[in-house]
Image (cartoon, rainbow, N blue to C red):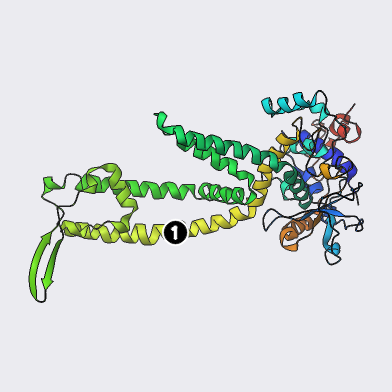
Amino acid sequence: QWMTTVGEILPELYKKNKNDGNKNVESTIIYKRCFCGKGLDIPFFDFLVIPPSTDNYLEVFIPITQLVPQDSVLKVEEISHDKIPDVQMVPLIDFVTNSKSLEVKGNEFMNILKSIVLPNNYLPQEECTIPFLSLIDNVEYDHIDPFYFNPSTEAIMNFMWYSSKSHWLKSLYIFIIYFLSYSIISWMYIAHIQVTGIWYELILLLRIFPGFAHYLNILYKIVIDIRSFLLFFALAVIAMGHALFIFLGYASYIGLSESPESFEVFNGSTIIYNMTEEEPEDIFTNPFTAIIAAYNWDSISLDVWGFWPLLIISVIGNIVFVIILQNVIVSFMSAAFENADKDGKCAVLTFQSRLIYDYANLERSAFTSGKSNFDNELKDKLRVKYICFYNEPSITKAWKHESKEWESTPIYSNFESEIQAEDDKSDESYESEFFIEKEDIKFIWTSAEE
């Protein structure tokens, strides 16, 4: 079944419930089975195949419903008969198509010059009428929103990202040129700490690659999930480092010194040389080096001081820091990794949605007046009427399970708690009467123009 009407009101639902936090209606719609249950009913078209960017992404098929020239180099293919039963259609028609046909105005040379000088010139909002963009604009920047968990949403975004990623690759190349230029002339700058900021920006920009963004998000989630234990671990290390600094920072005052190591060279059974190294530098004279030494506990040796209480401290430190705390942090990180890996793809889709929205609203983007690399191979601008995807069970299994749980939930199951009520407190037998104002549901049948 097609959900054309739902596609029109879904952005309004998100917009209406953006502030009050009630997403029961949207979640009930998003988990409808048809979003991953509408079989392919146009199997005889040629398809543009968009491969998955990583292993856990859906393979997308775009049916070419336009004329393709005989000399075209556009790579289209038919879906194999083995795949057809598992290919699903997104139940939203023309959801990524701009309803307004925009033509490039002005002189061609001036347009090229304008695109160089003002590469990020945005269209007025009324000229970019792509339904999916209005939905992205109203969905919160939150990867746990069920919108990013929906297979149809992922298929749409995979296509739009495939069409727009070349723009962000150009931005990456420009930044790399700037990065290399800065590295060459950095000797002219006094504040070398700025290089760290450039590396930080480069790492963030590399998130345009889904695999890199996925693992970067996992790292971020792990740090957030175990931040309390990391704080405890850091305080324990600082405490031990500070204690060693107080105790051994001025060891000579209490008659302690590190014993230098001695080496003997034999010729047979005769000692030829007897060498003694210089007295080692005391790393505990500085509080910062003492803290670093406490962190690298297994690399320090306290027995060279020849003081038995230090041997006890060394044994206790090995048990606490090397055996207990480091193994505990590894187990916590393993548990946090599993949770972060589950949410990783949704977080990447959330990040990509913002880039897609920014690019699609550009004056010369592939979705507005500009032409994509597909359009050059067709008679006319590519009109994506349908979007299909391969239903990979390992990817959609979790969503289908969640969808079954939402089947028994009515769309307005929690609506009574949100609408107004009239109570007659003077009469104890009088029950509350709920009523719906016209304004509460006006958006369902009122067109956007009204």
In the rendered image, residue 287, in percent from the top left (x then y), is placed at 27, 42
Q: Residue at x 18, y 52 (%)?
A: 280
Q: Quadrant of residue 325?
A: bottom left
Height in image: 280 above or below 18?
below
| Residue 78 can be seen in this image | yes
Q: 129 or 421: which is nearer to us?
A: 129
Quarter of the image that includes the C terminus: top right
Height in image: 332 above or below 115?
below
Q: 428 or 396: which is nearer to us?
A: 396
In the rendered image, residue 54, in percent from the top left (x then y), is placed at 67, 55
How many numbered dots are placed on residues in this image?
1
Mark 1 lies on residue: 328
Q: 24 or 87: which is nearer to us?
A: 87
In the rendered image, residue 364, in percent from the top left (x then y), is placed at 76, 32
> In the rendered structure, which amino acid carries the disc numbered 1?
Val
Q: Tell whether 364 sits left or right of 307.
A: right
Q: Quadrant of residue 141?
A: top right
Q: Which residue lies most toward the bottom here?
A: 268
Q: Tell whether 29 sits left or right of 278.
A: right
> Helix, strand or loop at disc 1?
helix
**Residue density around tag 1, few if under 14, some if 14–19, many if 20 or more, within 10 Å:** few
Height in image: 404 above or below 67?
below
| Residue 189 can be seen in this image | no
Q: Residue at x 34, y 51 (%)?
A: 295
Q: Residue at x 92, y 47 (%)?
A: 67
In the rendered image, residue 56, in percent from the top left (x then y), is placed at 68, 57
